[in-house]
Amino acid sequence: APTSSVEKSAFPKMREAFRDDVSEMVRGTSGQIIITSHMMPDDDATCSALAQKRILQSLYPDKKFKIVFSERKIDAWDDLLQDPSEIVWAKSELGKTAEDKVRQEDIIDYIKGGDALIGLDQGKFSSFTRFENQLKEMGIKTAILDHHQGDPSVATTSYVEPEATSTCEIIAKMYGPENLSPDVAELLL
């Protein structure tokens, strides 16, 4: 169903509330903040993760942020990185024979008790990890930001704006031009 103009007028206040919730979550986290997106990330997933990390890093230089994706590395995004370690690709190599098979690494292998998770460009934990139940059992603080219609997984805080063309668009509106460095603005574009 189309969104009414009344519902659209609520988006700026909801974005601001979500931004405040994420800020509070980041300030209250003693560990690192994992930023992720859906498996097999596309342009929006990758660029929104990089932009979100760089914005938060500039606002909270004393906090540790790490982008981790639960899928095989995609070389196409290497030109966007400030350094090769800016995105961690959970290892997804399986053994060549049945005896060599091992469980694939996943974002949950990078999360520890004091950590928090920011999931972008999808609303379901199952889009970020193959181990959704383990993620839920960890009880860590989670934030979900998405532009796809639907109900997100239960998270500490979430914001979905189905009228937005991308998660990058939401981040640009959420932080405003005064908080976007040229490299972040380029990522969001």
Image (cartoon, helix red, strand yellow):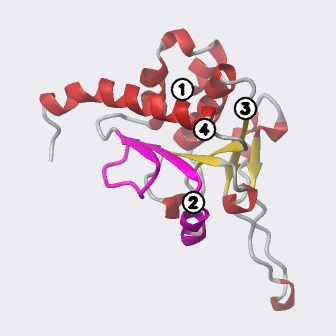
Residue named by callout 3: 63
114 vs 7, nearest the viewer: 114
Residue named by callout 2: 139
The numbered dot on residue 49 is: 4
Q: CA distance from mark 3 to mark 2?
A: 20 Å
User: Amino acid under label 3?
Assistant: Lys
Task: Say which label, 3 or 2, has the lower sequence index.
Answer: 3
User: Amino acid under label 4?
Assistant: Ala
Mark toward the viewer: 3 or 4:
3
Residue named by callout 1: 188
Residue 151: where, in percent of width, then height?
33, 55
Q: Give the residue at x 65% y 32%.
A: 53
Q: Give the residue at x 84% y 81%.
A: 96
Task: Say which label, 2 or 1, has the lower sequence index.
Answer: 2
Mark toward the viewer: 4 or 1:
4
Residue 133: where, in percent of width, then height?
54, 71
Q: Measured along the vertical axis of the image, is residue 182 above or below residue 158?
A: above
Task: Say which label, 4 or 1, has the lower sequence index.
Answer: 4
User: Amino acid under label 2?
Assistant: Gly
Q: CA distance from mark 4 to mark 1?
A: 10 Å
Q: CA distance from mark 2 to mark 1?
A: 31 Å
Task: Say which label, 3 or 4, has the lower sequence index.
Answer: 4
Residues drawn in magenta:
132-160
> In terms of secondary structure, where does tag 1 sit?
helix
Relative to residue 32, is residue 160 drawn left or right?
left
Relative to residue 97, is residue 90 drawn left or right?
left
**Residue count near mark 4 (Cα–Cα under 10 Å), binned few <14, some 14–19, many ≥20:** many
